[in-house]
Image: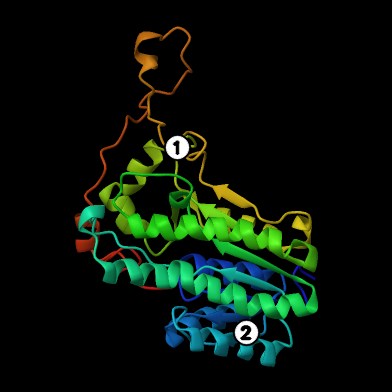
Amino acid sequence: MGQFTGKTVLITGASYGLGEGFAEGFAKEGADLVLTARSKDMLEAVAARCRALGSKVTVAPGDVAIEEDVIRVVKTAIAEHGKIDALINNAGVSDLRGIAPEQYDMQTWNWILSIDLNGAFMYMREVGRHMLERQSGNIVNICSIMGSGANEMNIIAYTAAKGALRNLTQQLGCEWADRGVRVNAVSPGFIITEMVRPALEGMGMDKWIASRTPMRRIGELHEIVGPVMFLASDAASYITGHDLLVDGGTNASNGTYQIPPIHHEWNKDTAPKVGAGYPGVQPRPDWYQVMEMGIPGLHYPLPEA
């Protein structure tokens, strides 16, 4: 028996990437699943792999930005499984065109917030009502280190949405704490999936990110799945309103970590020892080059999972 045997987990944005990883991770631990995203075909492919692991899976296509869809998916989940024990709020989009804030259009702003913030709230509200009635449940929101501080990447709507979701996590974590419902978040750094690995490694994005990360590498999918499952489990029963950073130390370094630190040049006797061929700071690849390569999950507009 797995740690989630007898539990039902609803995962948004479950059709690929992180959502797909979460689905398979919970299935391996015995959970029954409700998977939602816009693409029914992609959801069915993920569901087939989870069913092969022994999970009962309900596929419920829907758009997180449409309130009627959210209500329908939650009702379907309860009707099919009797209860929802955990909600993984994963669906999200971004805009990688690098638009300066003073040039940002309201159509793009509203589109991103409708999914990354409003959609996440609607799922918390609808699932939360059910959990509060049962006086039991766990919600894990997928935020981002971009919501924990400023950056120079010109993704202002995304950072605003993720920052708001982080604060919403803390607020609901407190408001529902004495009613049996825990609300937490995980804020990933850059996590590479098999879908995007070849293209990112081919153009050097992985090296640029690694050069600005204290652990000197990009995170792997299983390294975000584990923390999410931990917060959704009974092992985290006294944790609520918390945002768990899974970023290889990037946030702790205040985004200033460089390889090698400049003081290594004038203080060679006492500087930390590094191996031969230690990589220097990598130039940032051109986002437009990334998009032109048609990398799944990184082109504009970024598809909703």
Q: What separation in Å lies between label 2 and label 1 (alpha carbons)?
A: 38 Å
Q: Quadrant of residue 292?
A: bottom left
Question: Which residue does the image show at 52% across and 81% down from the upper left?
Answer: 36
Which of the two discs, 2 and 1, labels the residue nearer the N terminus?
2
Which residue is nearer to you in this view: 261 or 97?
Answer: 97
Q: What residue is disc 1 on?
A: 216
Q: On the rendered image, what quadrant is the C terminus found in? A: bottom left
Expressed as whole percent of the image width and height from the top left, the position of residue 26 reads: 65, 69
Looking at the image, residue 190 lies above or below residue 228: above
Where is 266 relative to 282, above or below? Answer: above
Q: Residue at x 54, y 87 (%)?
A: 60
How many marks are shown on the rendered structure? 2
Provide residue 38's location: percent of width, then percent of height.
43, 83
User: The residue under label 2 is which amino acid type?
Assistant: Val
Quadrant of image for the N terminus: bottom right
Q: Which residue is mark 2?
A: 57
Q: Residue furthest top?
A: 269
Q: Amino acid at mark 1?
A: Arg
Could you tell me which secondary element the residue under label 1 belongs to? loop
